[in-house]
Image (cartoon, rainbow, N blue to C red):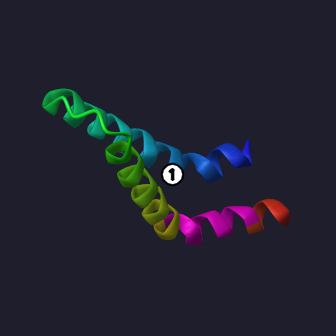
Amino acid sequence: MPALFISMPMLLVGLAVGVVVSIIQAATQIQEMTLSFIPKIISIFVALLLSFPWIMDKMLTFTR
């Protein structure tokens, strides 16, 4: 259960960015794989950086 809570911020950001990029690709009919891959990677990395203190707190609490 702690693994789900720890990974949730990155998964939700990846899901949201993926849906937005898919809608944009469907509207413009541009089907390029890098257009969906690069924004997801960047947004998940930013989400990891922003949520890292919370993740470490949860991990330390679980370990204790």
Query: Dot 1 surroundings within 10 Å: few (below 14), some, or many (20 or more)?
Result: some
Residue 61 in picture, x, y percent from top left: 75, 65
Per the image, label 1 sits on a secondary structure element best described as helix
Residue pictured at 79% horizontal, 59% vertical:
62
Note whether 27 is above or below 8 in the view shown: above
Q: What residue range appears in magenta?
A: 51-59
Question: Badge 1 is on which residue?
Answer: 9
Against 44, residue 49 (above or below) is below
Q: Position of residue 19 (x, y in %)?
A: 33, 34
Residue 50 to residue 39: above or below = below
Question: What secondary structure is the magenta-colored segment mainly?
Answer: helix
Instruction: Give the x, y percent position of residue 9.
Output: 51, 51
Q: Nearer the viewer, residue 32 or 56?
A: 32
Q: Give the image quarter of residue 46.
A: bottom left
Give the total number of marks visible in the rendering. 1
Q: Residue at x 71, y 48 (%)?
A: 3
> In the image shown, does 9 or 58 lie closer to the viewer?
9
